[in-house]
């Protein structure tokens, strides 16, 4: 086993988990009305190792919408379809240093990276360009299901409708991108934004999300089913950008303190990848001022104080 003393390991995980539970800082995301209905007490976590050992705590079986945790997954699928040379004509690889919903482009008039809203909207425009909306949605769900080892992947329609109704900023981003000709020919902006909101409203549980994270940790082969879902280069590129850009404008500090690729979303989800070891998915709705889950960040930072998972431990 990759973690031989798994029971002892999970005992330490318990301690870190319950310490983070006591953290009552943070606010629920309010710009998507449906997200304010979350219980601020919710706190769940699941682990899946690259050899399929599992562990779950707290509200790990609750469905949670992915929000921005979907961004690296869509990016990986688009890389798989088109290759990095094509994809990066449309989007950069540089942290933006700004909030995730900033209206702005890099000096080449591309979104800074696929992990901010502008970049994710462009990535959505590249996915399966010939397909109609329904087929695109099915395609995405099927790929996510493969990443999750056929475990829970669903869709929350009220979150989708709620986000779309209050999405002035994302519409502003969309029109700006359209003006700057950031999309491939033939893109229908309203359909595209609907698709982007739908991907944000896809639900997983910490359990199934941990399998996705473990598939990333395992170079694209799902540890539960053994199915090869993505090519290793897609995983390498995705993890690189999660490390440098995955935690909004806290990404530099997160890379310094935790030294692992992660991705957060305004639902309070965080997907964390320990390459070649395991995937972790955690969820707690109260967010810090960057938009990252307070309990999730505390857990990640405590984790690398307890175990030498930081990229540059063990040198
Ligand atoms: N759906 C959210 C938005 O576009 C996703 C952002 C996030 O999770 N940070 O605003």
Image: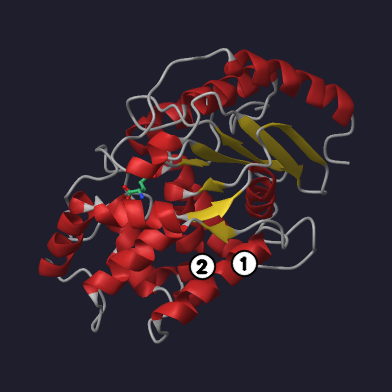
**What's the mark number on residue 230?**
1
Q: Residue at x 24, y 77 (%)?
A: 188
Binning the other alpha carbons within 10 Å of mark 1 as few (below 14), some (14 to 19) or many (20 upward) gives: many
Indicate yes or no: mark 1 CB to ligand 1 under 8 Å: no
Residue 40 percent coordinates (x, y): 49, 26
- Residue drawn at x 42%, y 74% as measured from the top left: 127
Vertical side of 281 occupied by 91: above or below = below
Q: How is the image coloured?
A: secondary structure
Q: Residue at x 45, y 79 (%)?
A: 134
Q: Does 100 sit left or right of 217 as displayed? A: left
Q: Position of residue 227 (x, y in %)?
A: 75, 68
| 98 and 138: which is toward the camera | 138
| Marks 2 and 1 in Cβ contact (< 8 Å) | yes
In the rendered image, residue 94, in percent from the top left (x then y), is placed at 32, 48
**Badge 2 is on which residue?**
77
Query: Residue 120, labelled with which disc?
Result: none
């Amino acid at each position: 086993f990759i973690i031989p003393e798994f029971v002892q390991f999970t005992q330490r995980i318990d301690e870190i988990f319950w310490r983070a539970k006591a953290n009552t800082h943070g606010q629920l995301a309010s710009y998507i009305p449906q997200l304010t209905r979350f219980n601020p007490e919710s706190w769940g976590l699941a682990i899946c190792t690259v050899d399929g050992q599992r562990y779950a705590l707290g509200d790990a079986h609750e469905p949670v919408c992915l929000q921005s945790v979907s961004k690296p997954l869509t990016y990986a699928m688009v890389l798989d379809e088109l290759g990095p040379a094509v994809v990066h004509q449309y989007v950069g690889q540089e942290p933006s240093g700004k909030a995730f919903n900033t209206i702005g482009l890099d000096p080449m008039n591309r979104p800074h990276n696929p992990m901010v809203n502008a970049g994710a909207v462009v990535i959505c425009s590249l996915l399966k360009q010939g397909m109609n909306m329904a087929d695109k949605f099915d395609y995405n769900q099927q790929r996510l299901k493969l990443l999750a080892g056929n475990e829970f992947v669903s869709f929350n329609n009220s979150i989708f409708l709620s986000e779309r109704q209050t999405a002035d900023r994302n519409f502003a981003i969309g029109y700006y991108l359209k003006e700057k000709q950031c999309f491939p020919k033939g893109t229908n902006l309203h359909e595209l934004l609907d698709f982007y909101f739908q991907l944000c409203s896809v639900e997983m549980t910490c359990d199934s999300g941990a399998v996705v994270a473990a598939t990333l940790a395992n170079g694209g082969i799902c540890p539960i089913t053994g199915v090869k879902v993505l090519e290793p280069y897609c995983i390498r590129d995705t993890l690189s950008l999660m490390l440098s850009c995955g935690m909004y404008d806290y990404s530099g500090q997160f890379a310094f303190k935790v030294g692992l690729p992660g991705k957060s979303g305004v639902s309070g989800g965080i997907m964390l990848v320990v390459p070649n070891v395991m995937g972790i998915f955690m969820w707690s709705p109260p967010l810090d001022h960057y938009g990252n889950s307070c309990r999730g960040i505390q857990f990640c930072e405590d984790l690398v104080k307890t175990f030498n998972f930081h990229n540059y431990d063990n040198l």
